[in-house]
Image: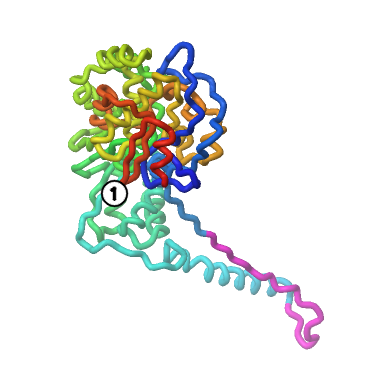
Amino acid sequence: MATPNGSAPRHGGSHFSSGSSARPSAPRAARPTAPAPSPATGASAPHPAFGGGRVSSRTAAATRRAGARNPRDPRGGSRKRRVPLAAIAVVGAIVVAAAAAVLLVPSLMSSDGGDEAQLAQEGTEVTITIPDGSGAGAVAQILYDNGLIADQSEFLSEVRRTEAESLLKSGSYRIVAGSDATAIIELLTTGPNASTAQLSVPEGFTVSQVAQAAQDSLGISADEFMAQAKASNYVADYPFLSDAHEDSLEGYLFPKTYDFSGMESVTADVVIRAMLDQYQAEVGSLDLAGAAATLSERYGLDLDENDVLTMASIVEREAVTDDQRAKVASVFYNRLRDGMRLQSDATLTYSLGRAATAEEINTLDDPYNTNLYAGLTPTPVCSPSLASIEAACEPADTNFYYFYITQDTEQFSETYDEHMQAYS
């Protein structure tokens, strides 16, 4: 939610305007309807609390330029001694070779353009993870970045000498700093030796963020994880997925730290099943089907289990503290009941993978743009905490239609005028 002058709060709050109160003829919260006209007031700014879906992307680029001057062919030199053309060619070849040596030797001595490698203290154990599909160059970079080798070129030379390019295995390794390249290569061709393989999934993570975490922590390809993460692959074993929309597991990969230590092979399927098992254990006692039926009657809507989970995911991205969650849920249910659009910036942020701009919030035709589309989003927008799911099942009984939340401020309002006073 943005303030009237366009500045964004530090957290929470939807972008509410006064132009979204028309009641539809047949209330239906589960699926978004065609976009409604843009509201006349309440322009929004990017929502920094959800920028990039909490996703952190770091890239580095280094450009090296080298120039070489070609001496012009000498003409009209001294007549006292004529140098044969063959001799000129030999000398030229020597000069070129010497120049090449000058250019190449420094790059072989240092892996980062001259900066001295920061090696880990000799004798300490360093744990690294080699992602699936990593080539020898990527492995060398990981070892260098973790201070286990001083020079990538020398390591790659040893890999080629031992013909180990195709034998390096992905996974997690404990490597003693100070080991020579031969010992490291032998370990990497034998297979993972790390005794702990943990995956930490914070509350509010999306499926794509889980996939990236699985790649970073367990060496599972993020692309492979995303390809496997389909509801249709698991509905036979997990009946609660029968209500999943868009064949998506969004919202069902329960946030927790998972320990796969001691397992011979940790695949995308293994991880997903562990997370679905946890969802079943945590959420099974809440009776989402019963909650959906009760909420449908209470608000005059047509909700299923996935709709309740979707509401919980939006609450997760909007509330700051646990005691706000039930009130935030009540605001959104009240708005659905009365035909008002949710106007949660977090939903479009999910679709874009970054904070939405004011123009996008007000004009972008996207079913996750709840500023323009009525109803809930096609799928959940993250993996909600148990507290958010409980709030979505049992929202507070309020007449609130608006809220304004930052890290240290909250206000829930019944009218738009009251809501706007929060900015003054």
| Residue 64 coordinates in the image, percent (x, y) | 54, 62
Judging depth in this view, the residue of 365 and 183 nearest the camera is 365
Residue identified by numbered label 1: 128
The magenta-colored residue range is 63-83
| Residue 50 coordinates in the image, percent (x, y) | 40, 41
Q: Residue at x 38, y 61 (%)?
A: 151
| Residue 337 coordinates in the image, percent (x, y) | 39, 19
Q: Residue at x 48, y 16 (%)?
A: 24
Judging depth in this view, the residue of 161 and 280 nearest the camera is 280
Q: Quadrant of residue 36?
A: top right
46 horizontally vs 257: left or right: right
Q: Residue at x 36, y 34 (%)?
A: 413
Determine if residue 243 is in view: yes
Q: Is residue 239 above or below residue 327?
A: above
Q: Quadrant of residue 419?
A: top left
Judging depth in this view, the residue of 193 and 186 nearest the camera is 193
